[in-house]
Amino acid sequence: MTEEADSGADRGATAFGGYAESMAELEAILASLESDDVDIDALASQVERASHLIAHCEGRLHATELSLQTILAQHDPPTTAEEDS
């Protein structure tokens, strides 16, 4: 595989940065798609990139939710059968 192909694959699949950076890129893609001068030749790659970014953001949100649940569970006092009655 060539270096150019590697960098393209990396950009499409793994080079997302943080959540805010990914959201900013999604907003830029959306603005591009909503413009009157949509580059038809780049349309499929933009939509594919947006799809990867959406999946990345959803994954980050899910991981953050699980992390917060774990942290909060550590601070919840254990309940006993006596306290429940």
Image: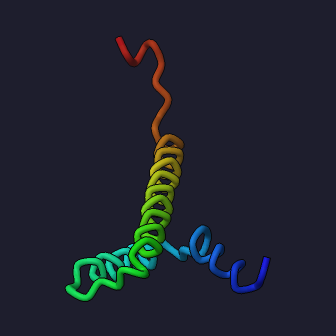
Write down the quadrant of residue 1 in the picture.
bottom right
> Residue 20, how many percent across, how many down?
42, 75
Q: Residue at x 65, y 73 (%)?
A: 9
Classify 66 as above or below 10: above
**Residue at the farthest bottom position:** 37
**Residue 5 shown left or right of residue 26 in the figure:** right
**Residue 36 shown left or right of residue 53 in the figure:** left
> Residue 69, how many percent across, how many down?
47, 45
> Residue 70, how many percent across, how many down?
53, 45
**Residue 17 shown left or right of residue 24 in the figure:** right
Q: Residue at x 42, y 81 (%)?
A: 41
The quadrant of the picture occupied by the C terminus is: top left
> Residue 5, how many percent across, how many down?
69, 79
82 or 1, which is in the foreground?
1
Classify 20 as above or below 57: below
40 or 60, which is in the foreground?
40
